Amino acid sequence: MDRVAARRAAGAKVISLCAGEPDFDTPEHVREAGISAIRAGHTRYTQVAGLRSLREAVAAKFERENGLTVDWRDTVVANGGKQVIFNALAATLNEGDEVIVPAPYWVSYPEIVQLCGGKTVVVPCDADSGFKLSPQALQAAITPRTRWLILNSPSNPTGAVYSRAELRALAEVLLAHPQVLVLSDDIYEHLIFDGAAFHTMAQVEPRLGDRTLTMNGVSKAYAMTGWRIGFGTGPGWLIEAMEKLQGQQTSGPCSISQHAALAALTGPRDFIQRSRTVFQSRRDTMVEMLNQAPGMRCEVPQGAFYAFASCEGLIGKITPAGMRLESDEDVVNALLDEAGVAAVHGSAFGLGPYIRIAYALDDHSLKQASAAIRAFCQALSD
């Protein structure tokens, strides 16, 4: 994103497909709630774990949408979903504890684990597995030092979605290892396509409820990335530890953002269905056009707003500017420099040679970007 900004500042035209955020405006009633909070003087500190009214709304959301029975005291509101994850790991990891992370993974997972003194155990999950962790691979990765398993469904970067049956199969493995906690990152929960249902681990296997942290937020579903509100629920001992840590770290989230998030969770939700319909249409367009580009191959993602396309067929080719493509990072660098399209290399997410494309962009720009990618691929030589 920094390179895109620099090129644009120099006058170059760049279509960016690398930002992981919806391109829609925050719904009007949510924005108005933020403005009203300012006018009403709700601009002071709040409780560390968030306003009680918002925590009650979070608890109601988990019960309404996920079938979880949650007391508001067993919730925490933080400065974005990332802080929920960080606080959970910081509160529980000792030096050398292991965290199982299926790859491809969101780039922050291994970094947060490292910052908290833990060791990331990466489990590769390729296209043949649907980019999803199998029970056999999970069992093989667990050791006496395993403290957490992180699951992200729908996935960033692949859009893969775990079914109820797939989660239950993983749960059977976890039940035999009571020392392993589960972090379920559900931030893309409402962006599932083709009429598929969403499931989360604590819902599928209630016996894991006392060692599962279910994390979510308003950033993706309500187009509120800049408001920085994430939340989670889990066993009381974990939530208490996370709250203590947050109290010495940032204290409570922005009071204005909390009032806006409250309006999002308690107000009309028709925006979610409309945005999901738009994203599904964009997905179909993007996947079709990527598969028309020589050397590219893209599976159909089930959720989120990312296409994770194999660029294996481009490796070893030479660009019109004379650059030999030795890796997926070379591919995205050349796409930016020679085609004016910004994407992210798959190896940054733990699996190459792929590129991640965020189709959270208007249809015209997506078609322009797809045409530029196709032309770039067609112009490559051996």
Image: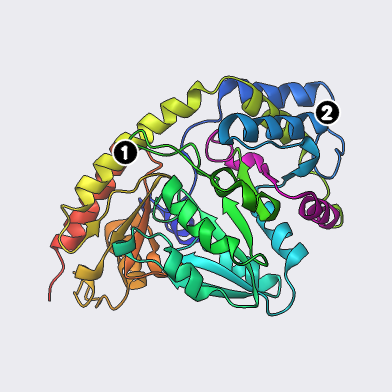
Which region is colored magenta? 219-246
Which circle's residue, 2 or 1, is located before the other in the chain? Answer: 2
Q: Tag count in the figure?
A: 2
Magenta stretch containing residue 237, yes or no?
Answer: yes
75 versus 379 height, above or below: above
Crowding at mark 2 (Cα within 10 Å: few <14, some 14-19, many 20+): some
Q: Whole-percent x and y of residue 13?
A: 35, 50
Callout 1 amino acid: Arg
Q: Residue at x 48, y 52 (%)?
A: 167
Label 2 secondary element: loop
Label 1 secondary element: helix
Magenta stretch containing residue 63, yes or no?
Answer: no
Q: Whole-percent x and y of residue 22?
A: 47, 39
Q: Whole-percent x and y of residue 70?
A: 71, 37
Q: How is the image coloured?
A: rainbow
Q: Nearer the viewer, residue 52 or 284?
A: 52
Callout 2 amino acid: His
Q: Residue at x 82, y 21 (%)?
A: 40
Q: Is residue 294 left or right of residue 7?
A: left
Pointer 1 residue: 282
Alpha carbons under labels 2 and 1: distance apart? 39 Å
Answer whether residue 108 is visible to the viewer in this image: no
Residue 42, numbered label: 2
Q: Nearer the viewer, residue 171 or 297?
A: 171
Q: Whole-percent x and y of residue 39?
A: 79, 21
Image quadrant holding the C terminus, namely bottom left
